[in-house]
């Protein structure tokens, strides 16, 4: 167990705390929830950076890092969907969660074919992740998204994340299409 893997594990450990704090009956829960999520989001960037910089990449990290990200993001989006109970929050959240399911299945299937690198993370995916982490942090911070500039920025970033999510999914599916197409010779 190295530092990058500990940081990845920390994200999973923070998820129940995020949920618990989010449901506390106090106004400070918004700041606390956003802070917990922000710490988890920073570890997402930092663990990968350290693993590459210190040459500490592991099979555990390669597997667990995306799992930790998906659990953290899906949980936070579900909390936000419930909190705001609105179509405008549900639609981009479900696009983001649905894409994660599709791409996870695609990567697993491509790995079985020995072509995992054809659906490796790209710049669009990294930009999508950054936008969605910031959007979720800002939305967790805001009790009423339409009540202030932070809420508007968070909502705009959530929609931008949804667009980037669809774009990156298209890029991944296009790369895998020769193996997915019903007309392929495979």
Image (cartoon, helix red, strand yellow):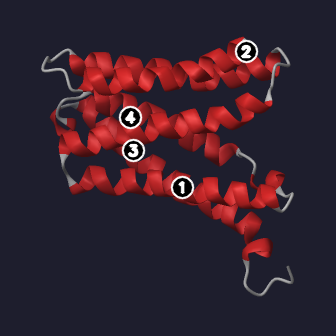
Q: Residue at x 33, y 57 (%)?
A: 91
Q: Is residue 169 left or right of residue 133?
A: right
Question: Dot 4 lies on which element?
Answer: helix
Tell me which numbered mark, 2 or 4, is placed earlier along the sequence: 2
**Foreground disc of the pair 3, 2:** 2
Question: Dot 1 lies on which element?
Answer: helix
Q: Which residue is mark 1?
A: 101
Please tell me in which quadrant of the rendered image residue 182 appears.
bottom right
Q: Are marks 3 and 4 in contact (CB under 8 Å)?
A: yes
**Foreground disc of the pair 2, 1:** 2
| Res 1 label | 2
Distance from disc 3 to disc 1, alpha carbons, whole Å, reads: 18 Å
Front in this rendered view, residue 80 or 138: 80
**Foreground disc of the pair 1, 4:** 1
Distance from disc 3 to disc 2, alpha carbons, whole Å, reads: 34 Å
Q: Position of residue 67 (x, y in %)?
A: 59, 38
* Position of the N terminus by quadrant: top right
Tell me which numbered mark, 3 or 4, is placed earlier along the sequence: 4
Distance from disc 2 to disc 1, alpha carbons, whole Å, reads: 28 Å
Q: Position of residue 17 (x, y in %)?
A: 36, 20
**Foreground disc of the pair 3, 1:** 1
Q: Are marks 2 and 1 in contact (CB under 8 Å)?
A: no
Q: Residue at x 48, y 38 (%)?
A: 71
Please tell me how crowded label 3 is: few (under 14), some (14-19), or many (20+) other residues with Cα within 10 Å. Answer: many
Question: Dot 3 lies on which element?
Answer: helix
Q: Is residue 80 left or right of residue 59?
A: left
Q: Residue at x 84, y 58 (%)?
A: 115
Q: Which residue is mark 4?
A: 136
**Foreground disc of the pair 2, 4:** 2
Q: Residue at x 62, y 64 (%)?
A: 170
């Amino acid at each position: 167990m190295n530092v990058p893997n500990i940081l990845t594990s920390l994200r999973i450990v923070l998820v129940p705390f995020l949920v618990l704090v989010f449901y506390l009956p106090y106004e400070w829960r918004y700041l606390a929830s956003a802070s917990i999520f922000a710490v988890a989001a920073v570890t997402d960037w930092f663990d990968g950076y350290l693993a590459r910089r210190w040459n500490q990449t592991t099979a555990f990290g390669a597997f667990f890092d995306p799992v930790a990200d998906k659990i953290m993001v899906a949980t936070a989006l579900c909390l936000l969907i419930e909190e705001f109970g609105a179509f405008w929050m549900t639609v981009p959240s479900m696009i983001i969660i649905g894409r994660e399911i599709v791409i996870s299945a695609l990567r697993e299937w491509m790995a079985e074919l020995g072509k995992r690198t054809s659906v490796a993370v790209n710049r669009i995916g990294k930009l999508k992740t950054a936008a969605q982490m910031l959007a979720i942090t800002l939305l967790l911070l805001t009790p009423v998204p339409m009540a202030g500039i932070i809420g508007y920025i968070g909502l705009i970033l959530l929609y931008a994340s949804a667009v980037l999510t669809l774009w990156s999914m298209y890029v991944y599916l296009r790369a895998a299409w020769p193996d997915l197409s019903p007309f392929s010779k495979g």
